[in-house]
Image (spheres, rainbow, N blue to C red):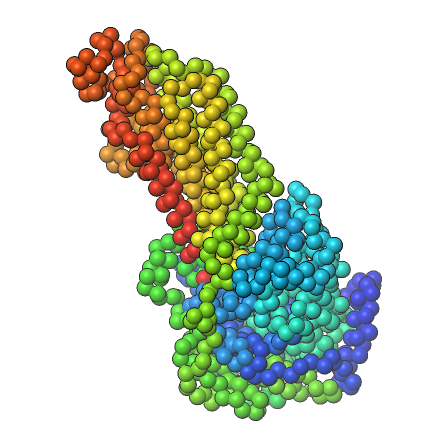
């Protein structure tokens, strides 16, 4: 296949600058291969990652039968990042960039990830990694109605310990604003699609700033330049470079950086289908390609041309093996592999039939010359081994499998969360049994390899270090970091050649100090800070409060106009009161649905902030309740006053308000719980409406307790509408103080059904306390509605107990299941 040629003639200034640089680097004979000075990799320094592999299970059809097959999203990636430098992770779409970043950051659950991560030569635990690092997500999850200064101040309050005074925190915030060039936007709202705010570049810098306010040692950024113009993207990376100069280790994914951005990068890691293709300086790409016998053509950007070469080999019959082997072992391809043939169009054939290339092209077959490698394995054994390792025994299967993180993978316990989105509680109901079993038994899918308490200590000899672990299922060969010497075709390996002299010793593992607090602030201070932020959001987003207030006010007036005066003592009034009270409770419950989108919008912010222990989940749950309590009180009081005054209801207005207040608290807790379990607000609305309707049906208004089938009677007791409805009726009808007369036909049709005379009525008549002309008293209404326990406070306590239980479940879901990690 002919080499890629560009047909466009228009070149930007960046391309011309790159052209001048490429002209100096692309000397095929190796003369004057200039390269930017790069710090030599030293084992035991900075961040080291060895043999990282991550797999998911997919279903494939073989001979008409669906089977599970393990596919690797990351495959034996090793390397090193030094302090004070930026390592950029690059590659085509679906290369595994975000997966690789998550693997290093400890955002992949233990047991799903193979390999080791070390800092300064010592293994680390995931908790330690989260303690010393920050992770900036690709999406800017920020509160739109907070200013830049307020956003940074909140980050300072929750990330910095209370030993630092508020004046010092403000000073650090102003220094950060100046460092990120956000001084002019200090008091500008963040904004969103419906509100004007900061620009896209400023918004991205704010996202970075809130995660570096506590000066972490490691900073991970997922596509920090995504969606930005070239100037804004350069500005963001320039600020990241300044952060690196302060001594931090920076790892970030980036997609096709401009030439100016390339010059800011210290090292790049190029991936393709989860395999390492290049690791080194951006200025060494041209020499790498020249050594691979694919020199960069004049006028081409070296990185862009490398991606073109990757695509060419990926779409060929040879696959990516020549590039991977050249990067790893220095094995140069001969003429056959230098000109790979494009895969022929897929034609119908027997499933899993072998392609002739499967056996003809092996990773170390006669098509490759060993270069500086002195020995080779037996050809047949190597071919079989490589096919098993890299899965090229099924061409169609590999083509159909998309390594992109945005696809949906089979819903298995190990692959549930293979996506760019964090692990949400919306998946709770999908694998609850597996989650519960693994949580109790502590049995992950494969033995955890992130941090092994009995480590294999590497022997340092000749400037090399050995890999720390091997997985029996596959042969692991650590990747080699090539340093290209000017004027030579031979590649020298400085740091990642393996030395297999293993010394078994117990290594020191970096973990959180035993007596160190996991969070920077005490619980009460977290609650206070979160209350302050939530209050600002509610005040500046009045629709959060006014929407329900307006609904309750308008509906109170409408109901008053429908029922008019309810202070008469006749049978029609009884029916009207029953209908009014049940509609009031349903109105309160259905009006709480506005909390569904509210929390779903905050959910990703909560996950981002708690992923690195900014605050406790319990602090969030309690603070949201505290802030909304006064608003619930105002809303309940508004409805109670309007209806009590216009309808002149005979019941106690204080009890009426307390019942409504408790109903608002409980319904909000229930809606928040549902919001934490569903993936979207549309599903949330559907679940809330369906369950509320079920509560409505079984509360005792349509079907009394004795009329509900025995198998469904338990729904009557868990119905959250049952208890406020009964409390309102008790508040209105308890006792014999009111006597109701009229035509019995006025009670039918109606919810009262068969009228029953209570024992209290009979006893009162026998004692002479009631007149014989009194047809019904309020106690008869309660008896006919099958209400036996006539205690308002008992109903209110049970109602609030359900609210507490919903909040507790909400906390459990947030604490144990809404985590920012893949499984």
* Residue 20 point in image, percent of width and height: 82, 74
* Residue at the image point whose x is 34% and y is 22% from the top: 732
* Residue at the image point whose x is 32% and y is 61% from the top: 440
Rendered image quadrant of residue 717: top left
Question: Left or right: where does residue 4 sit relative to residue 140?
Answer: right
The quadrant the C terminus occupies is bottom left
Q: Is residue 263 visible?
A: yes
- Residue furthest out toward the left: 766
The quadrant the N terminus occupies is bottom right
* Residue at the image point whose x is 50% and y is 82% from the top: 467
Camera-nearest residue between 532 and 352: 532
Q: Is residue 137 above or below residue 355?
A: above
* Residue 720 point in image, percent of width and height: 36, 36
- In this rendering, the count of numbered labels is 0
Q: Is residue 640 above or below residue 128?
A: above
Q: Is residue 605 above or below residue 85?
A: above
* Residue 614 point in image, percent of width and height: 52, 59
* Residue at the image point whose x is 30% and y is 13% from the top: 740
Rendered image quadrant of residue 302: bottom right
* Residue 362 point in image, percent of width and height: 54, 78
Camera-nearest residue between 12 and 589: 589
Camera-nearest residue between 348 and 192: 192
Q: Is residue 256 visible?
A: no
């Amino acid at each position: 296949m002919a080499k890629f040629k560009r047909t466009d003639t228009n070149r930007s200034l960046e391309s011309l600058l790159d052209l001048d640089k490429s002209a100096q680097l692309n000397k095929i004979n190796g003369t004057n291969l200039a390269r930017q000075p790069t710090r030599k990799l030293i084992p035991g320094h900075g961040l080291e990652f060895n043999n990282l592999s991550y797999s998911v299970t997919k279903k494939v059809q073989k001979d008409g039968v669906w089977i599970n097959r393990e596919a690797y999203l990351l495959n034996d990636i090793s390397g090193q990042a030094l302090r004070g430098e930026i390592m950029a992770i690059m590659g085509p779409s679906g290369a595994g960039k975000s997966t690789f970043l998550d693997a290093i950051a400890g955002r992949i659950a233990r047991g799903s990830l193979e390999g080791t991560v070390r800092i300064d030569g010592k293994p680390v635990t995931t908790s330690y990694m989260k303690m010393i690092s920050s992770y900036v997500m690709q999406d800017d999850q920020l509160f739109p109605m907070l200013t830049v200064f307020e956003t940074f101040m909140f980050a300072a309050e929750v990330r910095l310990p209370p030993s630092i005074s508020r004046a010092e925190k403000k000073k650090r915030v102003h220094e950060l604003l100046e460092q990120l060039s956000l001084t002019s936007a200090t008091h500008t709202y963040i904004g969103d699609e419906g509100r004007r705010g900061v620009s896209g570049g400023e918004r991205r810098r704010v996202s970075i700033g809130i995660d570096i306010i506590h000066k972490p040692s490691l900073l991970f950024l997922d596509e920090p330049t995504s969606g930005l113009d070239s100037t804004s993207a350069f500005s963001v990376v320039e600020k990241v470079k300044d952060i690196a100069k302060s001594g931090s280790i920076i790892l970030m994914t980036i997609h096709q950086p401009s030439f100016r951005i390339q010059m800011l990068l210290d090292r790049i890691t190029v991936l393709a289908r989860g395999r390492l293709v290049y690791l080194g300086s951006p200025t060494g790409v041209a020499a790498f390609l020249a050594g691979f016998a694919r020199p960069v053509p004049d006028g081409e950007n070296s990185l862009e041309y490398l991606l073109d070469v990757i695509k060419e080999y990926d779409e060929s019959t040879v696959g990516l093996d020549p590039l991977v082997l050249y990067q790893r072992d220095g094995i140069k391809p001969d003429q056959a592999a230098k000109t790979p043939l494009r895969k022929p169009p897929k034609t119908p054939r027997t499933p899993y039939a072998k392609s002739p290339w499967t056996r003809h092209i092996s990773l170390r077959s006669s098509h490759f010359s060993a270069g500086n490698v002195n020995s080779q394995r037996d050809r047949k054994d190597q071919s079989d081994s490589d096919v098993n390792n890299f899965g090229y025994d099924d061409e169609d299967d590999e083509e159909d499998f998309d390594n992109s993180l945005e696809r949906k993978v089979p819903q298995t316990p190990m692959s549930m969360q293979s996506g760019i989105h964090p692990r949400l509680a919306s998946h709770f109901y999908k694998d609850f049994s597996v989650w519960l079993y693994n949580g109790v038994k502590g049995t992950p899918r494969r033995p955890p390899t992130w941090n092994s308490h009995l480590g294999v200590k590497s022997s340092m000899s000749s400037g090399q270090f050995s890999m720390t672990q091997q997985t029996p299922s596959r042969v692991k060969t650590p990747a080699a970091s090539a340093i290209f010497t000017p004027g030579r075709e031979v590649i020298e390996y400085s740091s990642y050649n393996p030395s297999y002299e293993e010394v078994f010793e117990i290594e020191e593992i970096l973990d959180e100090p035993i007596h160190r607090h996991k969070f920077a602030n005490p619980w009460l201070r977290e609650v206070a800070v979160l209350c302050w932020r939530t209050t600002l959001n509610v005040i500046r987003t009045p629709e959060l409060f006014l929407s329900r207030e307006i609904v309750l006010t308008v509906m109170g007036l409408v109901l008053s106009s429908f029922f008019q005066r309810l202070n008469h003592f006749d049978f029609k009034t009884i029916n009207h009161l029953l209908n009014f009270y049940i509609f009031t409770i349903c109105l309160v419950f259905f009006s709480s649905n506005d909390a569904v989108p509210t929390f779903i919008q905050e959910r990703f912010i909560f996950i981002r902030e708690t992923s690195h222990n900014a605050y406790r989940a319990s602090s969030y749950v309690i603070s949201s309740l505290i802030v909304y309590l006064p608003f619930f009180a105002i809303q309940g009081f508004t409805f109670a006053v309007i209806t009590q005054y216009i309808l002149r209801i005979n019941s106690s207005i204080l009890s009426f308000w307390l019942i409504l207040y408790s109903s608002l608290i409980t319904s909000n807790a229930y809606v928040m719980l549902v919001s934490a379990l569903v993936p979207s607000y549309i599903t949330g609305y559907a679940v809330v409406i369906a369950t509320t309707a079920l509560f409505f049906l079984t509360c005792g208004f349509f079907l009394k307790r004795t009329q509900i089938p025995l198998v469904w009677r338990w729904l009557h007791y868990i119905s959250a509408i049952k208890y406020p409805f009964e409390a309102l009726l008790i508040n209105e009808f308890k006792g014999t103080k009111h006597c109701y007369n009229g035509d019995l036909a006025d009670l039918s049709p109606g919810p009262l059904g068969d009228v029953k005379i209570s024992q209290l009525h009979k006893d009162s008549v026998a004692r002479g306390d009631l007149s014989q002309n009194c047809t019904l008293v309020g106690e008869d209404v309660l008896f006919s509605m099958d209400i036996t326990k006539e205690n308002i406070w008992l109903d209110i306590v049970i109602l609030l107990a359900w609210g507490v239980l919903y909040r507790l479940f909400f906390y459990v879901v947030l604490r144990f299941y809404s985590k920012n990690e893949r499984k």
